[in-house]
Amino acid sequence: MFFRYLILITGIATAISAQANDAVELRSGLLINMPAAQVYLMQPAGGVEAVAVATGATQWRSDSADQPLSLQQNLLLLQIDTELEGRMDLAWINVDTGRVESTEAVTLPKGVIPRVDQGLGQEFDHRLTAAGDLIWEHRSRPVRGMPSEQPAPVQRQAGAVSLSGGSIAALAPPDPQTVSALWQAQSPEVPASSAGQRRFQATGGDAILVSREDADASIWERYEWTVLGAEGKVLGQFRSHMGYSPFVVLDGVLLYVTQPLSRQTADRGLVSEPLMLRAIDLASGQQVWARELRDTRYQGSYPA
């Protein structure tokens, strides 16, 4: 049955750009405003923070909303974390001031709780289409304590809203093929020019990362990253423990995310690190700042 979405609007009416998105999404909930050289990230304890790319300085914080979704000129659309069933709360925040300009709520099908963090057997996620529509998908599956040869099938529900034309507008539910295509990862790898290296395209830019692995497996940072700009010009070089991670290059700074990890070291013992956004100054190859990110994976207990 066709599900009719109800849009409830509170606060000030906002005029937004008809463009799909004026920011680069490095990962879900992490947007880079390229013209303003500003990062919008989810804080670990909730809320959103705007950070300057060059210095890592906090430009503003807001506890009014949590997950950045889209940037339309100087207005940032975010989801407000909630435990309410059947409603997705959204907020428009002015990126110059961090002030909430308006809030809106979209009704969802029965049983859908749009949590920012994953629940036990529950995920709520978003993608943007090229036309500027916001597609959401709710995935659920019963969780059993013991592995099963025939796991329960994933139940999927999806919907869409338009972010163009001056306000949020309801759309008919998208077809499954459209939803599936949006969630299929596009490989950033490009052909390598020589053996022993891998090459990757930057997210939202033309920079190329050349990754080479050291033959000595005992080295922690065993990968050499060389970043190339236009016409193959070397922009910088540094070492990483990862062969690749999605990255953005902006004003001489490389931004990338490292996953949570624990490892034993000779000098410091057991070292644990959370999900982190890191900024590397390409001229020096040194990290200039880092920010812990909200880890939305389910990390609770499982049924026996």
Image (cartoon, rainbow, N blue to C red):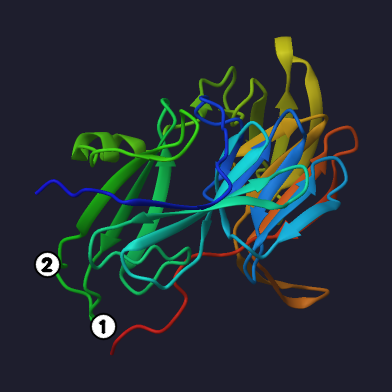
Q: List x then y, in percent, for residue 272.
A: 68, 72
Residue farthest to the top, as pictured: 231
Q: Residues within 10 Å of mark 1 (few under 14, many from 20)?
A: few
Which badge, 1 or 2, comes first in the chain's sequence? Answer: 1
Q: Nearer the viewer, residue 196 or 61?
A: 61
Query: In the rendered image, which residue does mark 2 sit on?
Result: 150
Side (left or right) of 282 relative to 256? right
Q: List x then y, in percent, for residue 68.
A: 57, 49
Q: Nearer the viewer, residue 93 or 6?
A: 6
Q: Which mark is residue 113?
A: none
Q: Is residue 33 visible?
A: yes
Spatial separation of the CA atoms under disc 1 and disc 2: 13 Å
Q: Secondary structure at mark 2?
A: loop
Residue farthest to the bottom, as pictured: 304
Identified at 71% across, 44% down, the residue is 39
Identified at 62% across, 68% down, the residue is 46
Q: List x then y, in percent, for residue 284.
A: 90, 37
Q: Which mark is residue 145?
A: 1
Identified at 20% across, 37% down, the residue is 175
Amino acid marked by disc 1: Gly
Identified at 64% across, 24% down, the residue is 205
Q: List x then y, in percent, for residue 127.
A: 42, 42
